[in-house]
Image (cartoon, rainbow, N blue to C red):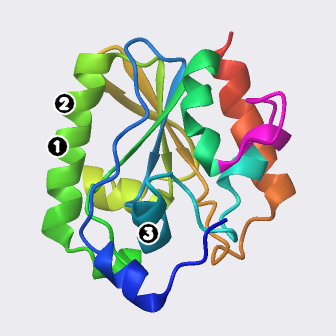
Amino acid sequence: MTRFTRADLEAARDRLVPDVIADGLHVLFCGINPGLLTAATGHHFARPGNRFWPVLHLSGFTPRLLKPAEQHELLAYGLGITNVVARATARADELTAEEYLEGGRLLAAKVALRRPRWLAVVGVTAYRAAFGHRTAQVGPQERVIGESRVWVLPNPSGLNAHWTAATMAEEFARLREAALA
């Protein structure tokens, strides 16, 4: 992986990272927003400490561990990636409540248009902020966007110490079973 300087990462602030998306996916995974390394590389969940890619593999969504640079291979498995808020920041706490709400509105429109079977928001706090559902928990939600069901997954950030890669993989696998049933 390319080594980025602090200046390189700061230059990526507010940069947009294109979605990995197609119509009719099994699951559209939705991160909170791109981090600076993700924005600098153009690859979702690029930070080495982020457990998204390992958990995706451990849960059986992918037959091998993909690297962030291989993100477009997800489409062949009926999977995609987007974000609640498109703007890159160093930390999610830099986002405003208004950005989350607007992001939720734009995400709902994207999901209604693209019609994935499941929208999987990785991060219960982001889901609560974007959709105003303050008591939401990890797991399937009652909310439906168009014909798409919603599942909230644990945040795969290395900062989320409440979940191990193994327990996250169990929750991701529950979604995989529902999505492929």
Name which residue lies at 38% across and 88% down. Answer: 7
Side of 132 where 28 appears, left or right: right
Residue for badge 1: 105
Question: What number is the disc on residue 35?
Answer: 3
| Callouts 2 and 1 close, C-beta under 8 Å | yes
Residue interval drawn in magenta: 56-67
Q: CA distance from mark 2 to mark 1?
A: 6 Å
Looking at the image, the residue that sits furthest to the bottom is 6
Q: CA distance from mark 1 to mark 3?
A: 21 Å
Q: Nearer the viewer, residue 97 or 84?
A: 84
| Crowdedness near tag 2: few (<14), some (14–19) or many (≥20) residues, C-alpha within 10 Å | some
Side of 65 where 179 appears, left or right: left
Side of 55 where 119 appears, left or right: left
Name which residue lies at 23% across and 18% down. Answer: 113
Quadrant of the image containing the C terminus: top right
Kind of residue sitting beneath label 1:
Arg
Choose top left, top right, bottom left or bottom right for residue 77. Answer: top right
Q: Nearer the viewer, residue 133 or 79?
A: 79
Name which residue lies at 56% across and 57% down. Answer: 45
* As drawn, 128 above or below 139: below
Residue for badge 2: 109
* As drawn, 1 above or below 76: below
Q: Nearer the viewer, residue 107 or 124?
A: 107
| Callouts 1 and 3 close, C-beta under 8 Å | no
Kind of residue sitting beneath label 2:
Ala
